[in-house]
Image (cartoon, rainbow, N blue to C red):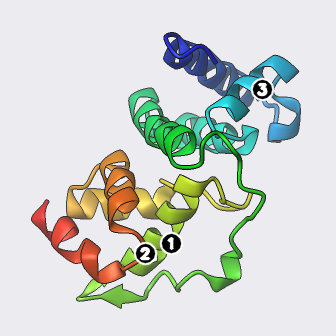
Amino acid sequence: MNALTWTSELKQIFEHAVAQYRAGRRGSDSYFTPTQLAALAAIGHTAQEVYDFAEDHTNYGQPDWETFLLIASVRRDYFLNVQQGVLSSHRIDMDRLPPKSEAVDGIEWLPRLVQKAQAKLRGEMPDDLMYDCGGDRRFFAQWNVHPADFLRFAWSAGADVARYVPFVRGN
């Protein structure tokens, strides 16, 4: 993707995915052209990630385009600057995520969300898992935290869940 136009290219891909979903097509494997797939790979994204956002946007009205763009921007920055443009071949194991009810300092969902954010940053989300899914959105709304801000904080905070408590409570 062109460094100056990647956001408009990504918006076209997102809008294409939303139109495909609204037309009744299901499954990310048939949504995108090879050119679109290459553009996504150039910013560290997969077709499944775009599909998930388009699906939730269509079905629930969120996340909106701007939220998707902000999350994509954090992932792109991490991919280009930390991973030096090299995609990870690893995918996290969903069965090893903390339970949704697990809490740290009374904040349920936080241990799970931290691991999801770390996986999102590294591009290691399995196809059956979404960062900023409905459960994540409930958490973000409850704690008044934007999902892109949480992701950017995750970049600096790492995997130590206790470091997230003041950040989450501070919002």
Camera-nearest residue between 49 and 133: 49
Task: Give the quarter of the image for residue 97.
Answer: bottom right
Q: Is residue 114 left or right of residue 5?
A: left
Question: Answer yes or no: do the residues labelled 1 and 2 have beta carbons within 8 Å?
Answer: yes
Asked which secondary structure carries label 3, the reply is: helix
Question: Quick check: 162 above or below 49?
Answer: below
Residue at screen point 22% across, 76% down? 165
CA gap between label 1 and label 3 equals: 27 Å
Quadrant in which the C terminus is drawn: bottom left
Residue 82 lies, in percent from the top left, at 52, 49
Residue at screen point 79% across, 30% down? 24
Q: Which callout, 1 or 2, points to the residue nearer the camera?
A: 2
Name the residue beneath numbered marker 2: 159
Name the residue beneath numbered marker 3: 38
Q: Earlier in the sequence, mark 1 or mark 2?
A: 1
Camera-nearest residue between 162 and 142: 162
Name the residue beneath numbered marker 1: 115
Residue 23 in view: no
Asked which secondary structure carries label 1, the reply is: helix
Amino acid type of the residue that numbered disc 3 sits on in the rendered structure? Ala
Local crowd size for mark 1, using a 10 Å CA cut-off: few (<14), some (14–19), many (≥20):
many
